[in-house]
Image: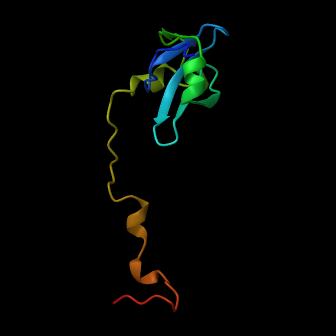
Amino acid sequence: MAMNNLMPEVSAWYQDVVSGSLFEVVAIDETSGTIEYQMVDGEVGEYDTNSWQLLFLSPAQPPEDWRNPYELNSEDQAYADQTLVPENWSGALSDIEPDLMDLGDDFQIL
């Protein structure tokens, strides 16, 4: 018997009515039928679809201190919606010289 009619939604917060714990759904893998979640304290876990349906859940608002496990402070939050553009687009990979790659005797570039 299904106790929970809520469909899991990534980045949505839920409260387990029985334990009182708050968690956020962080990923849903439809192939394996798992729902990955993260608790307010940073602990991560997963439910399978059947376990999810047996939970007594209610939708919840994100707690005010939900950033604590990520150790984000107000300065970090200031950049949350800004796109940071690197000054040098080439990066470290541009320093690799392709002629120095030794592919061994089994490989020939045709």
Percent from the top left, x then y, of residue 83?
A: 32, 35
How many dots with numbers? 0
The answer to whether residue 35 is above or below residue 73 is below
What is the image's colouring?
A: rainbow
In the picture, which quadrant includes the N terminus? top right
The answer to whether residue 74 is above or below residue 102 is above
86 vs 61, nearest the viewer: 61
Q: Taking the image as drawn, is residue 96 in sight?
A: yes
Percent from the top left, x then y, of residue 2?
A: 54, 16
Q: Which of the 4 image quarters holds residue 91?
A: bottom left
Q: Residue at x 42, y 90 (%)?
A: 108
95 vs 25, nearest the viewer: 25
Horizontally, residue 18 falls left or right of residue 3, namely: right
Percent from the top left, x then y, of residue 88?
A: 33, 54
Q: Residue farthest to the front? A: 1
Q: Residue at x 52, y 87 (%)?
A: 104
Q: Residue at x 50, y 84 (%)?
A: 102
Q: Residue at x 32, y 43 (%)?
A: 85
Percent from the top left, x then y, of residue 16?
A: 60, 12
Q: Which of the 4 image quarters holds residue 12?
A: top left
In the picture, which quadrant includes the C terminus? bottom left
Q: Taking the image as drawn, is residue 67 in sight?
A: no
Horizontally, residue 63 falls left or right of residue 19, namely: left
